[in-house]
Each structure stands twice: as C-alpha cells, then as structure tokens.
Image (spheres, grey):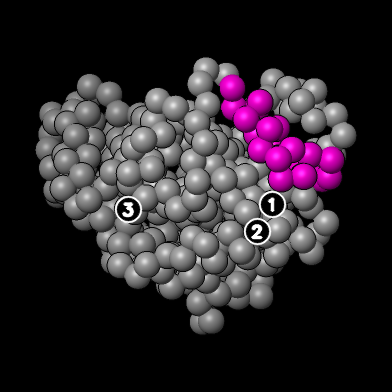
Amino acid sequence: MQPIDFGARVRALAARLSADGIAAYVGTRQASLHYLCGTFMPWRGAVIVTADGTCEVAYWAMDSERIKAEGCAHPVLEFYGSGLIELIANRLAARGADRGHIGLDLAHPGAAQIAPGMLTAGEYLDLTVAMPQAKLVNGVRLIDDQMLIKSPAEIERLRQAAHVAHNGFWAGARAIRDGVTENHIAGVVEASIRDQGSTWAWSVTGGTEVGAGERTAFYRGVTQQSTDRPIRANEFVVIDLHPLIDLYMSDLSIPVFFGKPTPAQRDAIACWEETVAVMLDTLKPGRAVRDCVATAVAAFGKSEIGKAYGLPLFGHGLGTCARTRPFMNASSDDVLAPGMVIALGTHFYQPGVAGMRLEYPVLITEKGAEALAPTPPKVQMIA
C-alpha cells in the first residue's frame, strides 16, 4: 500500500492551529491517535501538537514499548496510573503553550454517539486546575476538517477494508442454514476477515452483529449482537461487520432473506430498496448533507410503512474512526465533496414483519457515489 507521511499530517494540523490562533491541539480520541501516530493505540493516551509544529505522544506505560516498536512516528512519553493529565500539562508548559487556547477532543456537535477517547469530564476539570491560564476549547473540528477528505493512500486502505468486509459478508451469508445459530454465522464472518488481515472488529455493538427473524425487527432497532438463537427458514438475517485494515475501518451490512418472503415482507423490501436507490443517487458533490437526508426521508414517506418504520439516519463517515463526519443526518452542516468516504446507512425496522439495515461504504467522486464493495445494496435472497 502507498505509504502515509505522518509528518506532513502534523505540519498541516500545525498550520491550521497557527492560522486559528490555537496554541496546541491535544487529541485523545482513538481516531486522532491513529491518524497522527500510525499504529494501533487502544489505551489511554494523547497526541500533543503545537502551533510551531512539534508533536509528542503521551501514552500509558504498560503498552508504550509496543507502539514504539510498531511504528509510532513521534516521541513517546509514558505515564502511569492516572498521570495522563499531569503529563499533558507539563508538556504544554515546556512548549510555552499552557497560557493560550488549547483545542481538546470534547464533543462532536450533532452526533448521537461519543467517539472513543473523547476527554472525560473529570479529565477536563483536572486540566482546568493544572493549567489555570489556558483557554480550553473544543478542538474536534481542527483535525476533523483535515481528516474529512481522504488522500489516495487512505482511499486505498478504505477500499481494501471494504473488500475484506465484502468477502466476510458472503462467507457468513453462504453459511446460513436452517438451525445454524447467529453466533456461528458471526464466527464464520470473523474467521474470514481475520484471514484477510483484519486486526480488530472495531464496533462497540459486539464486533460482528448477526440477528435473525424477530431480532432483526426491533422498533428503531439498530443493534443486533449475535446470540445462540437458531436461524430458521423464511426470515430476514442482519449481518453487520466491522473490519480494520491498517487502522482504516469498514462497515458493511446488506440485508439477507433466507427463504421466501410474504407479501408484507415484499412490500417492505420494495420500500427499503427504493429509498436506498434514491439516497445513492442524491450523493453528489456540492450537495448539503441535510438536503440528501431530506430527499431520502421523502422517499420513505411515499408509503405508510416507510413513514412509520424508516429511520431518518443515513450513515456516517469512515476513516480511522466511524464516529466521524460527515454524519448523515438532518443536523449536519457538511457539504459533500470528492474524497469523502461514507458508510451509507438506510434503516427499516417493522416489528413482526421486516428488519433491514444498510451500511455501505462509498467514495464521493466528481460524478457521485462510488461503491467500494462489489455487492449491490439490495436484499440478498438465499434459497
């Protein structure tokens, strides 16, 4: 794969800090650590970038030797126990940045989920005590604007992750049989993506999600961690998988129907597939995300079941995090642009009838949305 210049990323962020009058950015999110440091960092830590272009990493001592050995691109300073905040304050003071504006990973406005690694309330309070003359601000956008448009090297990784997800999805779908459990299918998927190089099923929803029958169709039910429930004929099956390739994530879920759907289920499928097609068609550069969402909501609204059971949530960004822009909901202020990568979502949950979820990685190009996975976003019928 194409190499990534982590030094160039730091320099670009430092230029943004300087232009905005921000003395330093302290990134505690896993997204920021992975994006700027280039190695898997699951434990508490921070990447500290100052406006003059220096970059240091504060990381938990019990895992620091591994990240040094496996390629962290910057100096790594260790802390023990709950010493992260003290170390951050000391390093900012040493750089003369403890009296200025400090950007922190505090919140994603408009996001329903908290990105892993956001600063805790306790840590924020400790920083106010440790640096009484600093002005602490939400710095999420400082780096998110940079991460929003993907480089060719990032697109290469995201494309590979999508193909790993595609192969894992079909390994699971082909293993569906009457009486096989959700957990078994999840295990088949996990084995497939691991064999292809995935190093972590990143989702907090139980890794690979598999749900069947009534478990696909909880009202507004966007989560199906796998269980020992047997899969039966004539049921929907949700398979939602989350591989990680060289720190870049994929998110793929395409509905499966095992058997022969009823007329009511066919109506639900038609409603869902039409909305998916409308949403894909509307993803054009220059369009506001909120306008794309309004178009898809209107597509659901053409039928009573769509109004009642289609959700107004249409996905999220993908990169070194999946809790990242552009958030495909009505509160987004993003405008689509070439180089954005989105896990397009389309959700329909009708209790007792149908449960369908789309998580579909697409790249925004000059022409529109390019699918990164080969399978079309339609309900896959398994005999």
**Relative horizontal placement of residue 150, taking residue 185 as reference (left or right):** right
- Is residue 106 in view from this perspective? yes
Q: CA distance from mark 2 to mark 1?
A: 6 Å
Residue type, numbered disc 1: Thr
Question: In this figure, which residue is indicated by the disc labeled 1?
Answer: 50
Mark 2 sits on what residue?
53
Q: Residue drawn at (74%, 38%), measured in percent from left and top?
A: 93
Compare marks 3 and 2 and give the one earlier in the sequence. 2
Indicate whether 308 appears above or below 314.
above
Classify mark 3: residues with Cα within 10 Å, few (<14), some (14-19) or many (20+): many
In this view, the residue in front, 302 or 187, is 187
Q: Position of residue 324 (x, y in %)?
A: 57, 49
**Magenta span covers which residues?**
83-107
Q: How many marks do you count on the picture?
A: 3
Asked if disc 3 and disc 2 are in contact, CB closer than 8 Å, the reply is no
User: Is residue 89 or residue 148 the one in the foreground?
Assistant: 89
State left or right for residue 143 relative to residue 375. Answer: right
| Mark identifier at residue 216 | none
